[in-house]
């Protein structure tokens, strides 16, 4: 059985990028009995940036409720919170001892902050970088390696982190001449590799350009109407490929409807009408799951029960890996 694993950081309300990049593929994969799924909420990863206790708690429930509302059956996979598996943090230290500092200097999340500081003319290029952010990929590698993952479904922005996990697994296995860790690979759905946000850049909580999956209809409509478009007029032919509205539409629509929508673009659809069509599609796609989501959010005790059950199964696997890891490095308990 192949192990599939992925995580989502509870730093906000999950958005369409999270859905298409991580939630949707994992829901599909979780229905395949030949695969063993580990899906988790990366709550300690969120702490690198989020320092508000109530928000962290709420977002954790929201991410869990979204995943389940969108079709994940927590009974058929291991669904858990990262913080419930302390073995992950033990492994994280061990992997840190195998991680060249230069590898972290090249990691995206860190480089993005350095670049922002550079652009802002900041003297200290590391301003705002805490060690949690700097070593973020090591904790992520621990998440992945501790469950002996083969495949990690993620959006394009996380591909490098999965490659770092693979590198660290290789360094470790080579050092001890043993196959302690399975070598993981990123699984990227090309269709949803990078979902654009309202301004056309990658949809991301840190850019403030997201469309949350579960939003009241009037707010959803407002957000859709904020999507950036060019200045072409109604009647002027438009290129679907360069339009954020079209790219989002295509993610949710049937192929024949997408084709028809592309035709409308070539015939010169008005931006207003394109937005209306996208809104209608989002609304019909998400209204069913939304009711389920509301129900789950109203019953956090049910989510706690699900977390407790997942924690037990996750720790079972994690502690088995850790026994091998400790033996390999020469720490015996
Ligand atoms: P996070 O919480 O930023 O994002 C969760 C998932 O959503 C994908 N995603 C996108 N995909 C396409 N287009 C977008 N605009 C977009 N925005 C987000 C991400 O690629 C990701 O798959 N570090 C991870 C969480 C994590 C993790 C792990 C993932 C921690 N440990 C172990 C996999 C395995 C993160 O910050 O994801």
Image: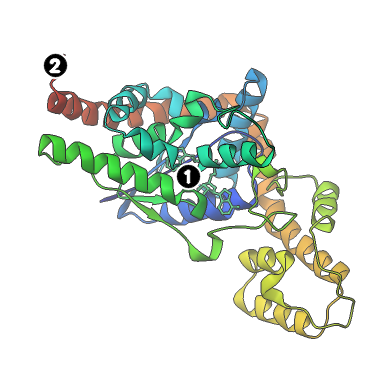
Residue 70 in the image: x percent, y percent? Answer: 58, 49
Q: In this view, does 66 lie to the left or right of 85?
A: right
The residue nearer to you, when weighing 226 against 15, is 226
Name the outermost residue toward the top. 333
Q: For the point 38% across and 46% down, which residue is it?
A: 162
- Badge 2 crowding class, 10 Å Cα cut-off, few under 14, some 14 to 19, many 20 or more, is few
Q: For the point 61% across and 33% down, which residue is it?
A: 11
Tag on residue 332?
Answer: 2
Residue 48: image quadrant is top right
Question: Is residue 81 visible to the viewer in this orientation of the structure?
Answer: no
| Mark-to-mark CA distance, 2 and 1 | 38 Å
Q: In this view, does 121 lie to the left or right of 127?
A: right
| Label 1 secondary element | loop
Residue 139 in the image: x percent, y percent? Answer: 40, 31
Q: For the point 47% across and 31% down, which residue is it?
A: 134
Residue 2 in the image: x percent, y percent? Answer: 28, 51
The residue nearer to you, when weighing 173 against 181, is 173
Residue 112: image quadrant is top right
268 vs 74: above or below? below
All told, the count of numbered labels is 2
49 vs 216: above or below? above
The residue nearer to you, when weighing 170 against 62, is 170
Residue 200: image quadrant is bottom right
Residue 279 in the image: x percent, y percent? Answer: 78, 60
Q: For the point 70% across and 45% down, which residue is it?
A: 214
- Badge 1 crowding class, 10 Å Cα cut-off, few under 14, some 14 to 19, many 20 or more, is some
Q: Is residue 24 left or right of residue 117?
A: left
Quarter of the C terminus within the rendering: top left
Tag on residue 73?
Answer: 1
Question: Is residue 329 visible to the viewer in this orientation of the structure?
Answer: yes
């Amino acid at each position: 059985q192949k192990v599939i694993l992925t995580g989502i950081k509870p730093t906000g309300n999950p958005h369409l990028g999270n859905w298409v990049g991580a939630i949707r593929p994992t829901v599909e994969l979780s229905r395949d009995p030949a695969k063993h799924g580990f899906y988790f909420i990366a709550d300690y990863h969120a702490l690198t940036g989020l320092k508000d206790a109530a928000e962290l708690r709420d977002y954790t429930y929201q991410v869990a409720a979204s995943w389940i509302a969108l079709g994940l059956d927590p009974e058929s996979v291991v669904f858990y919170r990262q913080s419930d598996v302390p073995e992950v943090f033990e492994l994280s230290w061990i992997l840190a001892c195998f991680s060249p500092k230069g590898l972290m200097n090249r990691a995206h999340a860190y480089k993005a902050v350095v670049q922002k500081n550079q652009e802002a003319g900041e003297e200290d290029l590391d301003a705002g970088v805490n060690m949690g952010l700097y070593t973020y990929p090591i904790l992520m590698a621990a998440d992945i390696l501790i469950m002996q993952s083969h495949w990690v479904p993620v959006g394009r922005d996380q591909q490098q982190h999965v490659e770092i996990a693979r590198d660290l697994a290789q360094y470790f296995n080579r050092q001890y001449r043993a196959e302690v860790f399975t070598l993981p690979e990123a699984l990227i759905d090309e269709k949803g590799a990078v979902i654009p946000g309202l301004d056309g850049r990658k949809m991301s909580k840190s850019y403030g350009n997201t469309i949350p999956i579960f939003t009241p209809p009037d707010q959803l409509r407002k957000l859709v109407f904020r999507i950036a478009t060019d200045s072409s007029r109604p009647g002027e032919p438009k290129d679907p490929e360069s339009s954020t509205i079209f790219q989002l539409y295509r993610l949710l629509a049937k192929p024949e409807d997408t084709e028809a929508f592309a035709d409308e673009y070539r015939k010169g659809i008005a931006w207003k009408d394109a937005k209306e069509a996208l809104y209608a599609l989002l609304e019909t796609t998400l209204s069913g799951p939304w009711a389920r989501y509301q129900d789950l959010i109203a019953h956090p005790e049910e989510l706690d029960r699900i977390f407790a059950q997942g924690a037990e199964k996750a720790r079972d696997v994690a502690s088995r890996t850790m026994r091998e890891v400790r033996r390999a490095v020469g720490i015996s308990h």
